[in-house]
């Protein structure tokens, strides 16, 4: 049929849209990278280690905070409230209970609790860094075990400090500082000031969360990656996390009210919330790794070794003419050989 090959080679609808819309093409590349590098698989592993690590890490962290801020209980309460506000639904109340228990029994945590939290936290951090490195599709060497664990410990402490700063900003934006600013400016009686305060608090929370996610995407992979590519991905992750908190609170309430929620309680909420958050972070990492700048700096694997296969062709002399020529050559060489022997 005339025109058959042209019809077969015509690009499909998605290919045409990708060629016409660079942002859509970037999004499709991100999804393909996420799937090819087993993003869902890594997210499931992160969820598992999050469940194992969350209780001991929170216990030790707030036990230490209880000692450090023993003379500033209002600051400790603000940080605790900021954490529970960033965790949707009844799951926030569960975490609040863990925090209160850690503060009340801060003297009983001791060395065993610190060792348990360190082991769980290092396992979680190691899997997080491996997952982020896989999304960037960077090769890495295993390296010395002790050096790797020390680096993971440093990354865990750095991430903890970054989260403390983020939570402190969230606490400031929704706490007495904002009220003090309103009173200082004498604008508390203006219509709509409450809405403006909520918008300001939300913007500060998004900025703080985006900064943490940007740092996670750009600095936690085991191999160096371009920081500029991670900025937009961090902002998307920050906005997505704030939306996830709002939607997740409604979803988790319905899940926890069902038969599975009654049977398993808050653990089910941690699994759902942790898995969605892990997938969000890993997809945004794949988004950062799919920019043109990142692809230009991406690692190009060495080609497969070349295989050289020698080919030998044996040709037989055919026909009487070929046979006669061969005989004449043989006779000529025989005569020359006889002369040489006689000499």
Image (cartoon, grey):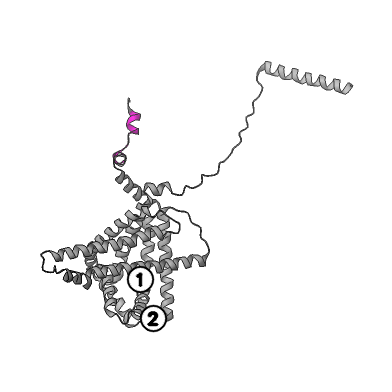
Q: Is residue 27 depicted above or below 72 in this figure?
A: above
Q: Tally the numbered discs.
A: 2
Q: Residues within 10 Å of mark 1 (few under 14, many from 20)?
A: some
Q: Which residue shows up at 43% across the image and 60% down it?
A: 130
What label does residue 54 carry, if any?
1
Q: Position of residue 81 (x, y in %)?
A: 26, 73
Q: Which residue shows up at 36% across the image and 69% down it?
A: 161
Q: Position of residue 24 (x, y in %)?
A: 30, 45
Image quadrant of residue 156? bottom left
Most common secondary structure along the magenta stretch: helix
The segment highlighted magenta reads: 4-16
Describe residue 119's horizontal placement relative to residue 27 as left or right: right
Q: Which residue shows up at 31% across the image and 80% down it?
A: 101
Image quadrant of residue 204? bottom left
- Between the residue at mark 1 and the residue at mark 2, the CA separation in whole angstroms equals 15 Å
| Magenta span includes 122 | no
Q: Residues within 10 Å of mark 2 (few under 14, many from 20)?
A: some
Which sits in the foreground, 22 or 176?
Answer: 176
Q: Position of residue 127 (x, y in %)?
A: 42, 63
Q: Which residue shows up at 85% across the image and 21% down it?
A: 338
| Magenta span includes 5 | yes
What label does residue 109 carry, if any?
2
Q: Quadrant of the C terminus?
A: top right
In the orientation shown, which residue stands out farthest toward the right?
Answer: 343
Q: Position of residue 255 (x, y in %)?
A: 24, 66
| Residue 48 appears anywhere in the view | yes
């Amino acid at each position: 049929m005339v025109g058959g090959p042209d019809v077969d080679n015509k690009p499909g609808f998605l290919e045409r849209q990708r060629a016409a819309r660079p942002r859509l093409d970037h999004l499709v590349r991100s999804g393909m990278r996420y799937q090819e590098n087993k993003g869902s698989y890594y997210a499931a592993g992160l969820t598992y280690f999050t469940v194992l690590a969350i209780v001991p890490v929170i216990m030790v962290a707030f036990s230490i905070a209880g000692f450090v801020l023993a003379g500033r209980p209002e600051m400790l309460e603000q940080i605790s409230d900021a954490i529970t506000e960033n965790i949707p639904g009844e799951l926030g109340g569960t975490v609040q209970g863990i925090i209160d228990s850690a503060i009340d029994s801060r003297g009983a945590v001791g060395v065993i609790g610190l060792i348990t939290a360190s082991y769980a936290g290092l396992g979680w951090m190691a899997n997080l860094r491996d997952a982020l490195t896989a999304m960037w599709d960077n090769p890495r060497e295993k390296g010395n075990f002790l050096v790797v664990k020390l680096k993971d410990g440093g990354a865990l402490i750095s991430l903890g400090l970054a989260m403390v700063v983020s939570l402190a900003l969230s606490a400031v934006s929704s706490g007495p500082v904002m009220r003090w600013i309103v009173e200082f400016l004498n604008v508390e009686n203006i219509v709509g000031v409450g809405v403006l305060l909520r918008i300001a608090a939300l913007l500060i929370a998004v900025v703080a969360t985006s900064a943490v996610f940007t740092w996670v995407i750009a600095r936690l992979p085991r191999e160096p990656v371009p920081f500029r590519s991670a900025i937009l991905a961090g902002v998307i992750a920050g906005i997505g996390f704030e939306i996830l908190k709002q939607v997740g609170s409604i979803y988790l309430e319905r899940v926890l009210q069902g038969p599975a929620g009654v049977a398993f309680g808050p653990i089910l909420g941690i699994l759902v919330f942790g898995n969605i958050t892990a997938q969000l972070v890993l997809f945004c990492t794949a988004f950062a790794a799919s920019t043109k700048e990142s692809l230009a700096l991406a690692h190009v694997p060495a080609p497969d070794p070349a295989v050289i296969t020698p080919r030998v062709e044996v040709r037989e002399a055919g026909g009487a003419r070929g046979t006669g020529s061969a005989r004449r050559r043989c006779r000529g060489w025989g005569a020359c050989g006889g002369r040489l022997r006689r000499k």
